[in-house]
């Protein structure tokens, strides 16, 4: 790390931690008073009596801002590659603190200061700071047991430990700044719920408004708008919240305008930057002697694809560019040396069109191209030099690869898994997930059904670890009943990789008689890793060598628990103020939601939009629970707990593959209800208890603190699989039953 990066390290750590301590001290019972801060803070009562517009605005802002920070921070700072729910946990901590402080003074600096610091951290074009941010994944990777593409893993040593400590030192201030941003939002929402004349009705408004925040952010994302528009909308909503406070209006306008301007002018590179509905895309022209010879595509600041022109005329006209490379046996054309002129070709992960162009060059009569990101497809249509997507032979599907192969009803002469890689997918919890439902036993078996009797099945993958190659070999062997051929391909201009080839036994035998094919097979070093476990839909963590809790996850979880505990202690929230019934309900709720998110990702793809859809279903079921408690027939708490237990057991036993119905909307409804039904019964329990304590903000705060812990417990799926989360959730809900408050007649709790 250079001098500038060292200076940046010190500034980020000291400013972030200093700001966090200062802001938390403002919320303590004996908070110091600053004259300037009095003008930037106010009592909730200064906004008047209960106001439904205030509750709607605060609730909408909460979810909108949560999704904004989750997507933006996770795309720009790759530290979240290792901790799927890092930002989500921070949001829960902030909301929980806000609900606990709903009767205390609201300090606008708690929101404005962190937002400004985070904007500076992400956008300032200081080389030392940018070097520091880029180094974070490597520092964490040095002490991680999960393989992240492009990040070297080091043996445990003083050097790797020092790197990990450095990463944690930077992670903590980022975590606390995100959390602090949500305190004022939680305060306003909690105060509104406490003072509402009808608590259940107000809680329903809170949920529906939160859902509106999800819809609003999703709409902006589907319009492929840049983050500057997200910040602009957030600034407008925040401004509406403080419209009645003149000084606050000025503070909000100045600080948030600065954030918007920082985000608007943050890109100092020569790349074209796009934000698709799924991820950040950066497209850079590749030049040779002043001529544009292709493009480099990055997703979330990570290399994704090189767009190349491999047409015969271009190759012949640029001999220096292809020196030492045989295009016909390169990564894109090699599959067609193994199966010449296939009648039908299925390409999963079509990207901007390299594989589609190769299929057309090699005489494929029909090409089915599957790509989940519509903007990547559009860029391919507009920029790929061979214009493969313009061919009438090409049929394009905007879909997740796993979803497509589960629903496809025809067979193909050649199927190519084209460098499908979960490292580029954006999710609600992080910019990189290590669960990948394309590379599981169930996915391979589904793909085998689509291979024609004389067809070939090819996985093309950039293998960096021997155990990853062994895992792929075992997956293909288990599905096809024989070891796949392994071949290496190389290209100085295209993309190198390893091919795993299986399919028709007769065609495989013909290939083995081809001297050129045998030469490529001999070039591929054979794997000698016996202990690798194959991935399944229940344990889909393709980039984790063995089940277990990685040391980095354990250590970071302990650090975050410590940070949360210190935040509570510093603001006079002791264990005695935690309402444990609501705490355990929150922890169990989060685990039910997480497993639903993961299973819905299997059905629709591993993207943050799936998570938004699951949250929407959860909110709808919660509203239905509210309506039932307020206006429907009386349902006892004991009966709701019984329904909760039965629905969790059903979700545990349900094979998710049964939910792959053809109609996408019907699939969404059926899957949402089947996987999220426990939320309905948990919602009944929660709202009855919430009404029983007269919608006390401490109860909601305790619920959110529990959700925070549930987010941390999610990591146990890395060890026991996704179903283990439902077992843990059942235990947590049992604990909530033990700690439930005395609800008297139970039937009158909601009045």
Image (tube, rainbow, N blue to C red):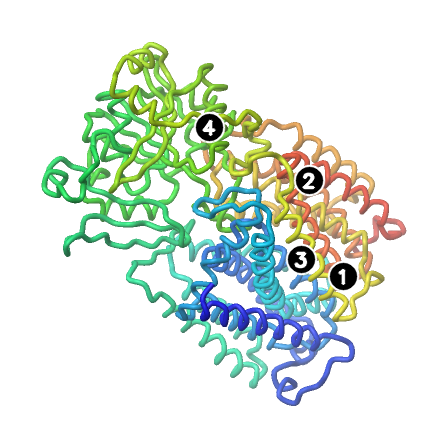
Compared with 298, 723 (above or below) is: above
Distance from disc 2 to disc 1, alpha carbons, whole Å, reads 22 Å
State the residue in front, 228 or 73: 73
Q: Quadrant of the C terminus?
A: bottom right
Q: Secondary structure at mark 2?
A: helix
Point out the tag, 4 or 1, that comes first from the N-terminus. Answer: 4
Q: Residues within 10 Å of mark 4 (few under 14, many from 20)?
A: many
Kindly indicate whether the residue at mark 1 contacts the one at mark 3 (C-beta within 8 angstroms).
no
Residue identifier under label 4: 472
Left or right of 70 on screen, residue 717: right
Label 3 or label 2, whichever comes before in sequence order: 3
Assess disc 2: are there few (<14), some (14-19) or many (≥20) residues with their C-alpha within 10 Å of its C-alpha.
many
Residue located 61% across and 37% down the image: 675
Question: CA separation, marks 2 and 4?
Answer: 35 Å
Horizontal side of residue 558 vs 423, given as left or right: right
- Distance, label 3 to label 2, CA atoms, is 28 Å
- Measure the alpha-carbon separation of dots 4 and 1: 53 Å
Callout 3: helix, strand or loop?
Answer: helix
Q: Which residue, as the protein is rendered here, is positioned at the far front?
A: 158
Q: Position of residue 566 (x, y in %)?
A: 73, 65
Callout 3–callout 4 Cβ contact below 8 Å: no
The dot on residue 560 is 3
The residue at which mark 1 appears reads as: 695
Rounded to the nearest whole Å, what is the CA distance between mark 3 and mark 4?
35 Å
Q: Nearer the viewer, residue 454 or 287?
A: 287
Nearer to us: label 2 or label 4: 4
User: Along the line of sight, which residue is nearer the eye, 737 or 709?
Assistant: 709
């Amino acid at each position: 790390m250079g001098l500038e990066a060292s200076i940046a390290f010190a500034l980020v750590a000291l400013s972030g931690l200093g700001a966090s301590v200062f802001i938390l001290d403002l919320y303590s019972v004996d908070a110091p008073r600053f004259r300037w801060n009095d003008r930037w803070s106010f009592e909730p009562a200064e906004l008047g009596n209960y106001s439904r517009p205030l509750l709607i605005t605060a609730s909408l802002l909460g979810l909108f801002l949560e999704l904004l920070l989750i997507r933006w921070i996770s795309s720009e700072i790759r530290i979240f590659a290792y901790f799927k729910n890092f930002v989500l946990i921070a949001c829960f901590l902030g909301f929980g603190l806000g609900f606990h402080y709903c009767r205390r003074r609201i300090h606008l600096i708690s929101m404005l200061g962190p937002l400004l610091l985070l904007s500076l951290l992400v956008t300032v074009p200081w080389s030392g700071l940018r070097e520091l941010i880029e180094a974070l994944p490597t520092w964490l990777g040095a002490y991680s047991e999960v393989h992240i593409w492009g990040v070297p893993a080091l043996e445990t040593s003083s050097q790797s430990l020092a790197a990990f400590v450095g990463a944690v030192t930077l992670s903590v201030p980022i975590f606390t700044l995100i959390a602090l941003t949500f305190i004022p939002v939680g305060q306003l929402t909690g105060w509104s719920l406490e003072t509402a004349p009808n608590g259940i009705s107000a809680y329903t408004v809170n949920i529906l408004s939160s859902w509106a925040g999800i819809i609003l952010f999703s709409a902006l994302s589907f319009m492929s708008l840049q983050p500057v528009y997200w910040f602009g909308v957030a600034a407008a909503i925040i401004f509406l919240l403080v419209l009645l406070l003149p000084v606050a209006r000025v503070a909000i306008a100045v600080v948030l305008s600065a954030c918007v301007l920082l985000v608007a002018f943050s890109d100092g590179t020569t790349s074209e930057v796009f934000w698709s509905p799924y991820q950040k895309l950066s497209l850079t022209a590749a030049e040779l002697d002043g001529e544009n010879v292709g493009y480099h595509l990055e997703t979330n600041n990570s290399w994704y694809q090189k767009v190349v022109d491999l047409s015969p005329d271009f190759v012949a006209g640029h001999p220096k560019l292809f020196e030492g490379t045989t295009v016909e046996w390169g990564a894109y054309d090699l599959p067609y040396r193994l199966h010449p002129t296939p009648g039908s070709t299925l390409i999963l992960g079509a990207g901007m069109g390299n594989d589609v162009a190769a299929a057309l060059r090699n005489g494929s009569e029909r090409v089915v191209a599957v790509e989940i990101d519509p903007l990547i497809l559009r860029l391919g249509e507009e920029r790929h030099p061979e214009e493969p997507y313009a061919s009438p032979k090409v049929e394009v599907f905007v879909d997740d690869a796993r979803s497509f192969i589960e629903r496809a009803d025809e067979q193909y002469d050649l199927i190519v898994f084209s460098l499908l890689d979960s490292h580029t997918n954006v999710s609600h919890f992080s910019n990189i997930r290590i669960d990948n439902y394309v590379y599981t036993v169930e996915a391979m078996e589904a793909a085998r059904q689509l291979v024609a009797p004389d067809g070939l099945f090819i996985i093309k993958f950039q293998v960096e670890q021997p155990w990853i190659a062994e895992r792929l070999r075992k997956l293909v062997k288990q599905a096809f009943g024989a070891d796949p051929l392994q071949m290496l391909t190389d290209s100085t201009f295209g993309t190198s990789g390893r091919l795993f080839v299986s399919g028709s036994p007769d065609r495989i035998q013909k290939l083995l008689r081809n001297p050129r094919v045998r030469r490529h097979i001999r070039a591929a070093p054979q794997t000698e890793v016996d202990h690798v476990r194959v991935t399944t839909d229940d344990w889909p963590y393709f980039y984790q060598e063995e089940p277990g809790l990685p040391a980095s996850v354990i250590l970071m979880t302990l650090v975050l628990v410590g940070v949360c505990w210190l935040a509570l202690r510093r603001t006079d929230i002791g264990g005695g103020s935690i309402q444990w019934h609501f705490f355990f309900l929150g922890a169990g709720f989060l685990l039910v939601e997480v497993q639903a998110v993961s299973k819905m990702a299997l059905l629709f793809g591993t993207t943050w939009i799936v998570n938004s859809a699951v949250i929407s279903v959860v909110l709808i079921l919660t509203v239905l629970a509210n309506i039932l408690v307020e206006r429907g027939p009386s349902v006892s708490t004991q009966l709701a707990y019984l329904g909760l237990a039965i629905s969790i057991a059903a979700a545990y036993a349900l094979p998710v593959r049964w939910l792959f119905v053809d109609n996408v909307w019907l699939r969404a409804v059926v899957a949402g209800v089947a996987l999220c039904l426990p939320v309905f019964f948990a919602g009944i329990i929660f709202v009855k208890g919430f009404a029983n304590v007269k919608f006390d903000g401490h109860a909601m705060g305790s619920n959110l603190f529990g959700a925070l812990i549930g987010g941390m417990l999610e990591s146990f799926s890395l060890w026991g699989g996704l179903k283990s989360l439902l077992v843990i959730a059942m235990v947590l809900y049992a604990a909530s039953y033990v700690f439930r408050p005395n609800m008297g007649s139970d039937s009158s709790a909601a009045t």
